[in-house]
Image (cartoon, grey):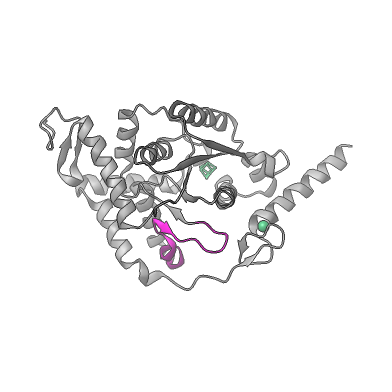
């Protein structure tokens, strides 16, 4: 198998593009895919600083690597979630990556916001699934930190992540979610612009990029992701892709063309009475949760004393 671009020995076959590529041409291919997403979806304007949310996994670290190589001003943001060894391990990968490449990283610890409790404890206290608590907390902290530093926020969602979400939204016709599913969510008041520069790259392509670039990333999955519906949807979509190469990309790009049909007027937002960040109610969900956890901590403290 020869590289279609330069004739060297090919290392990867991309069926969706009917393309075999060598290591060097594959590297250029990925950079071009990311640049295309940035250009086609107007993700980063001149001079904007990009905060890259990194988890220690292949996608987010590769995204940071790529944006840095493309010359963008970046800073990493790692949120220490407090999920046992998984969190300890992933933090090490992120710190090592940042120091190896001389990049700046900001580390935020969920325990510092919630009286010493991490995601696992909070989920138990409020009896809600860890992912629902975690998703809300991460979104809040990412937005706050990016806003305070005047950054836009980039996440490592790849094409497989986006089509799995799309399938989930379509199956239940969650039209409001469909209207908001975009690689470029504009800023509004104290909500920063959120971008997904990897949407034109598959999970397999990103894993190959990370290996070629010798990026050391955490291979373990978060223990709470086991059995997630999105994993099952990804398997289904891989079968579809195998049968009809290019399906994922078609599904996603054609959706973006009709997304406007699902867009509705944004709900009115007001500053949260406690933190001042936008919310639909009087107090935002983050502050409500924090109050609950703090009062729980106080109750157990008085009970213990
Ligand atoms: Fe958080 Fe769930 Fe993702 Fe784990 S799998 S990091 S708990 S959202
Ligand atoms: Zn608030």
Q: Residue at x 39, y 70 (%)?
A: 262
Residue 194, given in percent of the width and then of the height, sits at 46, 54
Looking at the rendering, the quadrant in which ligand 2 lies is bottom right
How many discs mark residues in the rendered view? 0
Residue 187: in magenta span: yes
Residue found 13% across the figure and 28% down from its top:
8
Q: Camera-side residue: 244 or 287?
A: 287
Q: Quadrant of the C terminus?
A: top right
Q: Is residue 211 left or right of residue 286?
A: left
In the rendered image, residue 183, in percent from the top left (x then y), is placed at 39, 55
Residue 119 painted magenta: no
Q: Residue furthest right?
A: 305
Residue 87: x percent and y percent?
56, 33
Instruction: Identify the residue at the far front of this view.
Output: 47
Q: Which residues are magenta?
A: 175-192
Nearer-the-camera pick, 48 or 27: 48
């Amino acid at each position: 198998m020869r590289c279609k671009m330069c004739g060297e020995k090919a290392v990867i076959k991309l069926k969706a593009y009917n393309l075999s590529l060598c290591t060097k041409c594959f590297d250029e291919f990925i950079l071009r895919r990311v640049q295309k997403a940035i250009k086609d979806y107007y993700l980063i304007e001149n001079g904007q600083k990009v905060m890259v949310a990194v988890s220690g996994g292949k996608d987010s670290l590769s995204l940071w690597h790529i944006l840095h190589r493309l010359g963008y001003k970046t800073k990493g943001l790692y949120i220490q979630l407090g999920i046992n060894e998984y969190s300890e391990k992933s933090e090490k990968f992120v710190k090592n990556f940042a120091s190896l490449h001389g990049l700046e990283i900001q580390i935020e610890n969920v325990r510092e916001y919630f009286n010493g409790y991490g995601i696992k404890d909070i989920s138990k206290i409020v009896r809600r699934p860890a992912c629902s608590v975690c998703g809300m907390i991460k979104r809040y902290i990412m937005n706050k930190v990016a806003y305070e530093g005047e950054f836009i926020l980039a996440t490592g969602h790849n094409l497989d992540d986006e089509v799995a979400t799309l399938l989930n939204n379509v199956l239940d016709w969650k039209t409001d979610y469909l209207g908001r599913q975009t690689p470029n969510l504009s800023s509004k008041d104290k909500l920063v612009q959120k971008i997904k520069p990897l949407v034109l790259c598959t999970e397999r392509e990103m894993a190959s990029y990370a290996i070629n670039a010798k990026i050391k990333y955490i291979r373990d999955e978060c223990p709470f992701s086991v059995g997630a519906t999105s994993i099952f949807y990804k398997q289904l979509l891989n079968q579809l892709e195998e049968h009809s190469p290019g399906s994922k990309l078609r599904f996603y790009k054609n959706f973006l063309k009709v997304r406007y049909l699902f867009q509705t007027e944004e709900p009115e937002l007001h500053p949260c009475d406690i933190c001042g960040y936008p919310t639909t109610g009087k107090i935002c969900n983050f502050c409500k949760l924090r109050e609950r956890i703090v009062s729980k901590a106080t109750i157990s403290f008085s009970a213990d004393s």
